[in-house]
Image (tube, grey):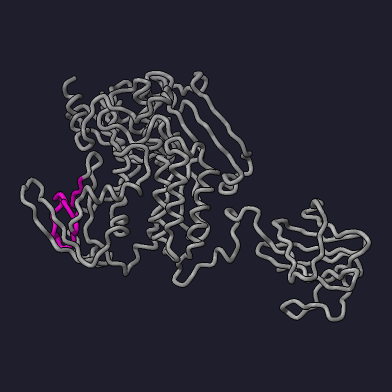
Amino acid sequence: MKKMVFAGLLALAMVPGMAQNEAGTALPVLREGKELIHIWVDGRLQPGAWRVSPQVRPDVYSTSGRRVKFANERDSVVFDVEKDGAYDFVVLTAEGDSAFTRVRWESANPLEEPSAEMLRRGPGGKLSKEQARFDVDALVYALGEIHPDLFSVCRQEDLFRAVKRVKDGMPDSVTVLELFRRAAPLVTLLGDGHTMLRFPYNDVFTETRRRLPLSVRVSTSELRIFADRCIDGLIPEGAEVLSVNGRSAAEMLEAMMPYASGERRFFRLSRLDYDFAALFEMLYAAGEYDVAYRAEGGADTLHATLRPATFAEMKARMPEKKKESKAPAYSFRIMKDRNVAVMDFRSFSDPQRMRAFADSMFSALRREHIDNLIIDIRHNGGGDSSVGDVLLRYISPKPFQQMGKALVRVTPTTLRLMNHPELKPGWTFFDGEDGSALVPPLSDDEGHYAGKVCLLTSHMTFSSASSFAWAFRHFGMGTVVGEETGGMSVSFGDILPYRLPVSGLVCTVSWKRFWLYGADENDIHGTLPHYAVPQEEALDKALELIGKE
């Protein structure tokens, strides 16, 4: 509710014939005196004096302050200003003229605090050209305010040329999906796997939306697509999808790459494996699909005609898959005949639970005299790195550390998004490679594992899983088998979600830069395996190596 406070007896007096506000109430009056009228904003005197202009109606004073006071030696009027508020009063001049004056709220930084008018969406939720451009500007502003090094990979001029092209080509109105299609590649240019504009699934995949009734798998090593499940079984599982409506698999994947954030091409392809259905719907939706494919092990090119279907139709008509319970974050199984245990490690979550799990697993390995352990993080996208420390203490032969250095950037925008009162704006650099922060391994009495350990990795091993793999190899904990990890030795991380003001699209933005222990800034790469094999062959290779020992 608007609040007005008037100081001075004469400010309460109403002058006959004066203007009224929209509610028909007479406006407050400020009378000129011998001295000039000055303005105080939030208790601070503003430079210069207010020049009364009876000919301008209204004569507007814009401010982002919360309390505004107009005053001279004779009179004063004070307004408590709220967002999007407008407050009218009249200045009565010494000559008897009346000047219709307005105090209006105006954001000090519209990109962080847009007006209500800017936020008001059009019919059907569409954005006007002005609103879409505003969201692009807000996105770029937020990236610049949060990210530690926006131009580590992308040149500044390349980003801003791309921004200009997007804004210049914006149509008169756009849907949220259309804005995503235009804006997401701007974020991908940064080359940071944690910083990305998220696909607006809720805007696209509604219950009534019809889509391509085919789920696929995308290779992370080459531009190839393979069928997973197809409606009515029209395309068999494992068949290679060669083209859809004449567009080859390679052409479609290349067109999708600008929407896959990541440091390496193979990791970006793994992102497409997850987002293919969404991106296909955005780029290639049609009323009918001619799919050319080659059956697994076959040589002939076959064709299937698929018609779009709703989710309910697909669920009812897709071939049944063996029902699998959701895989736990970590589990293990013992292969007694091979003298090996295999730990399936899918998520770095819940350090306390990991402590109980690790104690139980290694107790079982000692009890069963199992001399070999395979840790599988091929499908692990990361999480809480402290979970990794719990496990590494059982297997490391010496003190270790995952992170070597870290650069942390905190800005007012960061604080606003985090709502973390303990942090202060500024830059902080941590250097932990002096040995003072090394984590000691467990002693034999505490349960340290004396057996041999093998680690399975893939291009999808990312974030905390990648730093785990790096420490495992760097500190000589065992043998790495599989593919180079998707997470790099020097990378950005710890994300903040930023919601674009008008569209509501969400962008995750890194606010820290990490160097894994011993990483070289001039030679950035993922954890490299001792034995490089396709990830689907990694377990067999590890078992083979164990069998030869």
The N terminus is located in which quarter? bottom right
Q: Is-magenta flag for residue 368?
A: no
Tally of numbered tags: 0
Question: Image point 50% across, 56% down: which residue?
Answer: 135
Image: 306 above or below 242: below
Range of the magenta residues? 224-245
Indicate left or right for 47 with 172 as reference: right
| Rendered image quadrant of residue 346 | top left
**Is 180 on the left or on the right of 433, as rendered?**
left
Q: Position of residue 296 (x, y in %)?
A: 10, 47
In the image: residue 72, left or right of residue 454: right
Residue 229 is covered by the magenta coloring:
yes
Please, is residue 27 above or below residue 525 in the view? below
Q: Quadrant of the C terminus?
A: top left
At a point 37% along the width and 44% down the height, the residue shown is: 261
Q: Residue at x 25, y 64 (%)?
A: 286
Of 192 and 74, the residue lying toward us: 74
